Amino acid sequence: MVQQPHPHFDLIIRAGRIVCASSGIDGPGQIAVRDGRIVTIETSGTAQVDPATANRCYDFPDGILLAGLIDLHAHPANSAALFGVRPDDHILPAGTTTVLSQGDAGASTIAQYVDETIATSQTRVLLAINLSRIGESAPLGCFEDLDNADVDACVTAIDRYRRWIPAVAVNVSRRVCGNTDPREVLRRGVEVAQQSELPLLFGMRQPEDWPLDQQLELLRPGDIVTYCFRSQPHCIVEKGRVLPCIRAARRRGIRFDVGHGTSAFCFAVARAACKDGFLPDTVSTDLQRFHIDQATRHDLPTVMSELRAASMPENEVFAAVTSRPASLLQLDDFGVLRVDAVADLTVLQAGHQEPFADATRPAHVGPAWTAALVVKGGHVITTK
């Protein structure tokens, strides 16, 4: 137990289970918050802080208290982006306090993105800048005109806006590239990443166009492959086993992210990979505006629930949305429960049986977590 000298707190949250993969905490307890920071963490048997000393106290005897969830791949945007969803309406209330945009803005559109989305949102929005100057802003693929893959423009934009840019987004799918050579697109993306010393967030090409092992050989340790549990147009599983080239890439330090989407996720592939001992490094939603009106929920707690149903161990799921994405994005003060860390907190509670959306039909059904309390920088966003 670490206790601060002042007795007054803004907020105390009690939970039947507090979990932090980074600090090793896992058990009942309570957390006290003051001035936007965690000031006390008490586990069972160490509680000395009186809840009466807090302005507000919340008690979730059946809840799981985590650091604020981090979604490594989604499409937050208040304007201009083709796939954008308003983060304060559709991301933060569901438990995600930090979200990384996958390529919604590029060098020509980043100024507007910073002004109208990053600067105006309660949600902490970061950008994996698109190698394409136009970002995901037009119906046509952003690399159909190869001139949009402008290395110098992208590096210049990163230098100017680096505080909000922890990665470079490069997707070489047919939809994004059209008739443009995906090899040249990736070559330019790697050049930007090397010059800026940032990781790539990479979407692969189908293997009949370009063998997966050849694509992966161009990536560097720390680069992140998203959409890792697709069934089409590429799949990392064959006959129930993860492909050797995928395992070789992980051994070299390549990371793998879920990027759920709907067509980009197959429950059977996820289950086969997990049962074969291949767990994703990060769990993300790929949430975009076309998902908002779907019958099934598509928030991060729901996607976490689906990965748990696919045999991913529960504590691995928690790490994949807190400490692990924080480490990949070099967010030292987030994704962790420790004294003096930023008080971004999410309490999950078990919900009813819900359908999980994926690329196959019928959708799998299972118990789904929901966010019972969301705290961003010490401020309560929503509670149930």
Image (tube, helix red, strand yellow):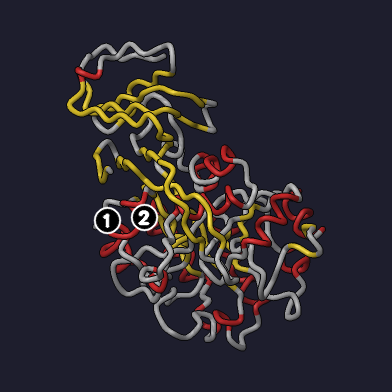
Query: Which residue is at the far bottom?
Result: 179
Q: Which residue type does callout 2 highlight?
A: Val
Q: Nearer the viewer, residue 58 or 256?
A: 58
What residue do we see at 66% from left, 49% from top?
279
Q: Alpha carbon of mark 1 to alpha carbon of mark 2: how far?
A: 7 Å
Q: Where is residue 276 shown, x and y percent of the image? A: 76, 50
Q: Which residue is mark 2?
A: 125
| Position of the N terminus by quadrant | top left
> Which of 160 and 267 lies nearest the eye of the viewer?
267
Local crowd size for mark 2, using a 10 Å CA cut-off: few (<14), some (14–19), many (≥20) = many
The kind of residue tagged 1 is Ser
Observer-nearest of 315 and 325: 315
* Quadrant of the drawing holding the C terminus: top left
Q: Residue at x 58, y 60 (%)?
A: 200
Q: Position of residue 178 (x, y in %)?
A: 58, 86
Q: Give residue 121's mark.
A: 1
Residue lying at 39% horizontally and 18% vertically, measured from the top left: 42
Query: What residue lies at 27% left-to-right and 11% top-to-bottom?
Result: 5
Looking at the image, the residue that sits furthest to the left is 55
Secondary structure under tag 1 reads: loop
Q: Quadrant of residue 383?
A: top left
Q: Is residue 9 above or below residue 1?
A: below
Marks 1/2 in contact by CB < 8 Å: the verdict is yes
The image position of residue 160, as x and y in percent, is 38, 59
